[in-house]
Amino acid sequence: MNSINAPSLSPARNVRSIVMVGLILGILFTATAPAFALQLPTMQIGLGETTNPKQVSVLIEIMLVFMILSMAPAILMMMTCFTRLVIAFSFLKKALGTQTTPPNQTLIGLSLFLTLFIMAPVFKQMNETAIKPYVDEQISLEQAVETGMVPLRSFMFKQTREKDLALFLSLAKLDKPKNKDEVPSSILVPAFMISELKTSFEIGFVLFLPFLVIDMVVSSVLLAMGMMMLPPVMISMPFKLLLFVMVDGWNLIVGSLIHSYGV
């Protein structure tokens, strides 16, 4: 008795069968998609206004924190005493002739903490007059911003020259203000910046003078001795360091910088 074998399908026919099944399933899914779509849940996200600071969502608070952190370097350099301090320390490092000592990170860190020390009364007044009342729902956000800028503007006005204010007022084509309250912050901030730059360069010039005298004396002595091949910097640097240590340079310079702001 001959056994009957079922005909085997070829690979090509298998592929065609799989493709046909896939097309049929795709057509069925497309036809029934609207029915399934109607049953899917929807979700809406919206932003509403609130006058209560405690009702602000955590997401918005995080966004505001990141925004403030991104602007913090600009605020630190343009509206505080950080610029004068870091430039003065940079001039001191150049005057001493030390290339890598102290490191730039050390000078920047020292400038940052001295800035916090000098600006502490201003920040304290801003916290008492603007931040706390706003958190306690006593004033609105606009009033908090306006009140908080008062002590900061007062600090900047004390360090800004009238000549620099007049420069930016003329460039902006604004009339001469009757009092300080009429000076916009967009004029005060750049005027404060160039005033700080001028003062810091004046301090740098004063810092360079004693060390320049030492360089000139050492160069003259070496030239008189005929030691022209010996770099004067190698000889003058120990004398500069000795002078700086003997007069207690860091105490003197840091104290003078702090007193320059009336602290």
Image (cartoon, rainbow, N blue to C red):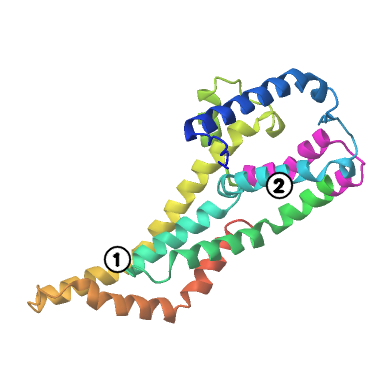
Name the disc covering residue 212, or none: 1
- Please give the range of residues in magenta: 132-157
Which of these two is toward me, 54 or 110? Answer: 54
Residue at figure coordinates x 77%, y 55% from the top left? 124
Q: Which residue corresponds to the image point at 49% horizontal and 58% vertical from the top-left?
A: 86
14 or 173: nearer the viewer = 14
Q: Is residue 263 visible?
A: no
Q: Label 2: few (<14), some or many (≥20) within 10 Å?
A: few
Point 78% across, 19% down: residue: 34
Residue 156 appears in view: yes
Coordinates of residue 35 in the picture (x, y in percent): 82, 21
Element assignment for label 2: helix
Q: Which mark is residue 65?
A: 2
Q: Quadrant of residue 54?
A: top right
To which quarter of the image does residue 209 belong? bottom left
Is residue 130 on the magenta stretch? no
- Circle 1 crowding by C-alpha within 10 Å: few under 14, some 14–19, many from 20: some
Residue 67 picture location, percent across and down: 66, 42
Quadrant of the snapshot with the C terminus:
bottom right
Query: In the image, residue 118 lies at what x, y percent?
Result: 65, 59
Residue at x 47% of width, y 53% of height: 200
Helix, strand, or loop for circle 1?
A: helix
Dot 1 amino acid type:
Leu
Q: Residue 178: x and y, percent?
A: 68, 26
In the picture as drawn, the residue positioned furthest to the front comes out as 1
- Mark nearer the viewer, 1 or 2: 2
The amino acid at mark 2 is Val
Q: Which of pointers 1 and 2 lies earlier in the amino acid sequence?
A: 2
User: How many numbered circles are shown?
Assistant: 2
Is residue 155 magenta-colored? yes
Q: Main secondary structure of the magenta part?
A: helix
